[in-house]
Image: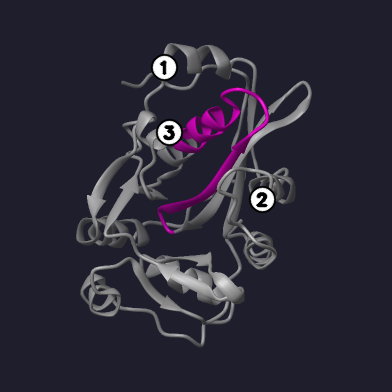
Amino acid sequence: MAPTPPPPSRWRFPSGPEEIAALAGDGELVAAGADLEPGTLLAAYRAGMFPMPMARGRIGWWSPLVRAVLPLDGLRVTRSLRRSSRRFEVRVDTAFAEVIAACADRRRPGAWIDQAILDAYTRLHHLGWAHSVEAWDDSGLAGGLYGVAVGGLFAGESMFHRRTDASKVALAGLVEALRSGGGRLLDVQWATEHLCSLGAVECSREEYHRRLADALGAPQLDLRSTRSPRRPPAAGP
């Protein structure tokens, strides 16, 4: 099912990396303010930016100088992860509310998702743009992630786990779905040791925008039919 287009944003976002650089200078915070309406969020992703909450309830719009992406042919599937994957079933959009709530849990180290972000992405989910990818076992939801699909782009926002390797299995399921569904770009924002261990690489802001333009020109991703049995993910490096 195609997502529902929201009303366009009343805010204008930069048209490319040159304008972003002129606004951000040597930094990565491009602007602050605006709103979290669905049209505004989609305009931001199409402009290569994403929101994060700031002090006093303000919204910051970010464009990293060095962007982290996970190549769809570069996921590192270790022997341990292959064994772990047998314990889980991967599903899409069967528990979005529970996934984003778990990602927003303030008891987690580095938790950053506030109520405004949670509400905004829930609205985007109801319109068909934001998705959860979940790992389930016999005890229920074991881990997962959520993000936004625009064209052939999937912009990952956050992930969590309740059982060992569950979020990694969800990520592997996402990569498999993107590869089979015509995905072009998996954006993971900033590189972390954890993401790099799974195959994430860094690229410049300019290179990211070249990849983004290619992804936005692709047909809209449809992830909602994804559901895999308990089996190992495809072999990787």
Which residue in the structure is indicated by mark 3?
A: 194
Q: Is residue 185 visible?
A: yes
- Circles 2 and 1, Cβ within 8 Å, touching? The answer is no
Quadrant containing the N terminus in the rendered view: bottom right
**On screen, residue 237 above or below 54:** above
Residue at 68% of width from left, 50% of height from top?
106
Which numbered disc, 3 or 2, marks the residue that appears first in the sequence? 2
**On screen, residue 180 above or below 148:** above
Which numbered disc, 1 or 3, marks the residue that appears first in the sequence? 1
Q: Position of residue 233 (x, y in %)?
A: 48, 22
Q: Residues within 10 Å of mark 3 (few under 14, many from 20)?
A: few
Q: Residues within 10 Å of mark 2 (few under 14, many from 20)?
A: many
Q: Position of residue 141 (x, y in %)?
A: 73, 33
Which residue in the structure is indicated by mark 1?
A: 78
Which numbered disc, 2 or 1, marks the residue that appears first in the sequence? 1
Number of numbered tags placed on the structure image: 3
Q: Is residue 223 visible?
A: no
Tag of residue 104: none
Which residue in the structure is indicated by mark 2?
A: 100
Single out the mark in the foreground, 3 or 2.
Answer: 3
